[in-house]
Image (tube, grey):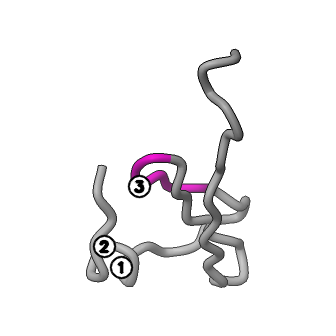
Amino acid sequence: MSLSDAKIRSIKPSDKPFKLTDSHGLYLLINPGGSRLWYLKIEKNPALR
């Protein structure tokens, strides 16, 4: 799912933090206070799982 600017701005915070995924390990964490935090989950060598 691709997160557009309009979709990100329209998201309302809830009682608990939740995350939305974009692609390839990119996440957007929405906190109850309304703050938004981007983070990227990187695997050093995914072939070694």
For the residue pair 40 and 32, the one nearer the viewer reads as 40
The segment highlighted magenta reads 19-24
> Given this view, does label 3 or label 1 mark the residue nearer the observer?
3
* Mark 3 closeness class: few <14, some 14–19, many ≥20 residues within 10 Å: some
Mark 3 = which residue?
Answer: 22
Q: Which of the labelled discs sits on residue 30, or is there none?
A: none
Q: Is 25 above or below relative to 9?
A: above
Depth check: 49 or 27 in front?
49
Marks 1 & 2, CB-CB < 8 Å contact: yes
Instruction: Find out whether the residues at labels 3 and 1 contact each other: C-beta distance under 8 Å.
Output: no
The kind of residue tagged 1 is Ser
Dot 2 falls on a residue whose secondary structure is: helix
CA neighbours of label 1 inside 10 A, class few (<14), some (14 to 19), many (20+): few
Q: Nearer the viewer, mark 1 or mark 2?
A: 2
Mark 3 or mark 2, earlier in chain: 2
Q: Which residue is mark 2?
A: 7
Q: Quadrant of residue 8?
A: bottom left
Q: Quadrant of residue 15?
A: bottom right
Q: CA distance from mark 3 to mark 2?
A: 12 Å
Q: Is residue 7 above or below residue 46?
A: below
* Type of the residue with mark 3: Asp
- Residue 11: image x %, image y %? 43, 73
Mark 1 highlights which residue?
10
SS assignment at label 3: loop
